[in-house]
Image (tube, rainbow, N blue to C red):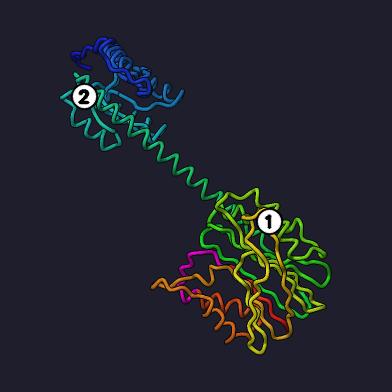
């Protein structure tokens, strides 16, 4: 290559230091150019590694990460066309596509630098260079390169998080009843639909002896992953203490004492827990601050199951009452979360309990699965399918 006048670096005492400036690979086939650039950049806080050939550049890149490459386009094989440099550029980007590259060129090869920029070069510097201009270009390229790498890391982390959330959805679905127990004289159906990938609603139906089942429905305040974690905690707590002999009021008190220490001050859980005895056709329940289920008799009489006490997680010594109700042939019991009644239309009008009651009265002759589908379909039509909260239903029909 033709000889150029080499700018003299500033004395070290006059150079502004930046210890975190970055790690730069400087490549040129002239030793005096390499030394001048090494001195300049080191005085300004850069860590500098030099290379004097395309092969050396690739070897050095393989040894570690750099914040930018400052390289000439012309080497010993061809001193004018820049073909070797353009080939090298492609090889550099193959190693790290986000690595900023600044090329150096003389006035006679400006067109070559423009072509290089079309191939992904961040900027170019004319020889002989201006120290201040070169430092400004490098600073900008290093910042942009770091920003690209940070964005790539965030995107990668986002992909990982999305994958973990999908896995959490599978785990949460696994906590729901895979098969609803069959109970002579009754038909039971349940469904769970989170507003996002995971949710804070909960329901469970499990056997308690030969002729009884537990019916549970709950709602953790909040949405998403935090609510889902609390939901799994609730499920484990209930399954851990429920027995044939434990009364619903006692279960709520035990769960409240056990789970309260795991809740943040602003968090709480509403819970309805009941035991349905098929032989006696009797429902014994405790309602811990949950939406009171509806029991619709075959003759159209409506009962609200509201006996119980406070929500779970607020009062450490919370005491609970319990209620009882018969469940005869033709009766329909509907447990629900507030995602059903608070589903809103375009005018922000909620579906509400009155619509739900009217729907139950008009369709009380349907079996449990059909009534459940009817309710969900009516709510979905009302809100245009735009559920803003988790929706959970448990329907029991007496045969």
The magenta stretch spans residue 388: yes
Name, please, the residue furthest toward the left.
108
In the rendered image, the residue lying farthest to the bottom is 299
Q: Which of the 4 quarters of the picture holds residue 71?
A: top left
- The location of residue 324, given as percent across then percent down, is 74, 75
Task: Say if mark 1 contacts mark 2, CB within 8 Å.
Answer: no
Q: Residue at x 29, y 33 (%)?
A: 121
Residue nearest the viewer, comparing 322 with 376? 322
Task: Please tell me whether residue 211 is drawn above or below residue 70 in the rendered image.
Answer: below
Q: Which residue is mark 1?
A: 256
User: Of label 1 and label 2, which has the lower sequence position?
Assistant: 2
Q: Nearer the viewer, residue 174 or 232?
A: 232
Residue 220: image quadrant is bottom right
Q: Is residue 346 magenta?
A: no
Could you tell me how many numbered marks the image carries?
A: 2
* Vertical order, 73 against 304 (above or below): above
| Residues drawn in magenta | 380-391
Q: Quadrant of residue 100?
A: top left
- Residue 344's x, y, as percent? 45, 71
Disc 2 crowd, CA 10 A, few/some/many (<14, 14-19, 20+): few
Q: Is residue 124 visible?
A: yes
**Marks 1 and 2, Cα distance to the nearest angstrom?**
68 Å
- Left or right of 375? Residue 119 is left
Mark nearest the camera among 1 and 2 is: 1
* Quadrant including the C terminus: bottom right
Secondary structure found at label 2: helix
Q: Is residue 328 left or right of residue 6?
A: right
- In the image, 9 versus 303, the foreground residue is 303
Q: Residue at coordinates 52% horizontally, 45% vertically from top-left?
A: 160
State the quadrant of the N terminus: top left
Find residue 104 and report its horizontal and vertical position in percent.
24, 24
Q: Which residue is mark 2?
A: 133
């Amino acid at each position: 290559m033709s000889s150029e006048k080499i700018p003299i670096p500033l004395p070290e005492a006059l150079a502004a230091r930046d210890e975190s400036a970055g790690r730069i690979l400087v490549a040129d086939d002239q030793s005096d150019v390499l030394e001048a650039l090494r001195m300049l950049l080191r005085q300004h806080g850069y860590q500098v590694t030099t290379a004097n050939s395309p092969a050396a550049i690739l070897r050095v890149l393989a040894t570690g990460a750099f914040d930018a490459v400052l390289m000439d386009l012309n080497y010993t094989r061809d001193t004018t066309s820049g073909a070797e440099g353009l080939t090298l550029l492609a090889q550099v980007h193959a190693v790290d596509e986000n690595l900023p590259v600044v090329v150096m060129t003389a006035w006679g090869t400006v067109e070559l630098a423009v072509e290089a920029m079309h191939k992904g070069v961040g900027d170019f510097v004319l020889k002989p260079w201006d120290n201040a201009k070169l430092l400004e270009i490098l600073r900008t390229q290093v910042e942009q390169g770091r920003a690209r790498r940070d964005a790539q890391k965030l995107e990668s982390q986002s992909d990982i998080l999305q994958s973990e959330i999908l896995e959490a959805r599978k785990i949460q679905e696994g906590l729901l009843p895979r098969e609803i127990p069959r109970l002579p004289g009754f038909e039971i159906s349940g469904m769970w639909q989170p507003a996002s990938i995971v949710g804070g609603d909960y329901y469970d139906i499990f056997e308690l002896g030969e002729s009884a089942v537990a019916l549970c429905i709950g709602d953790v305040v909040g949405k998403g992953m935090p609510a889902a974690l609390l939901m799994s905690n609730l499920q484990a707590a209930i399954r851990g203490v429920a027995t044939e002999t434990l009364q619903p009021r006692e279960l709520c008190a035990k769960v409240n004492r056990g789970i309260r220490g795991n809740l943040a001050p602003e968090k709480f859980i509403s819970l309805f827990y009941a035991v349905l005895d098929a032989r006696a056709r009797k429902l014994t329940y405790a309602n811990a601050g949950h939406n009171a289920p509806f029991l619709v008799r075959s003759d159209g009489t409506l009962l609200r199951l509201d006996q119980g006490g406070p929500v779970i997680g607020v009062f450490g010594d919370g005491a609970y009452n319990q209620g009882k109700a018969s469940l005869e042939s033709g009766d329909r019991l509907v447990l629900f979360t507030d995602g059903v009644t608070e589903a809103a239309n375009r005018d922000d009008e909620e579906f509400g309990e009155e619509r739900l009651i009217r729907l139950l009265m008009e369709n009380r002759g349907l079996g449990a699965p059909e009534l459940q589908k009817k309710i969900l379909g009516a709510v979905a039509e009302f809100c245009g399918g735009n559920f803003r909260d988790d929706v959970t239903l448990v329907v029991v029909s007496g045969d």
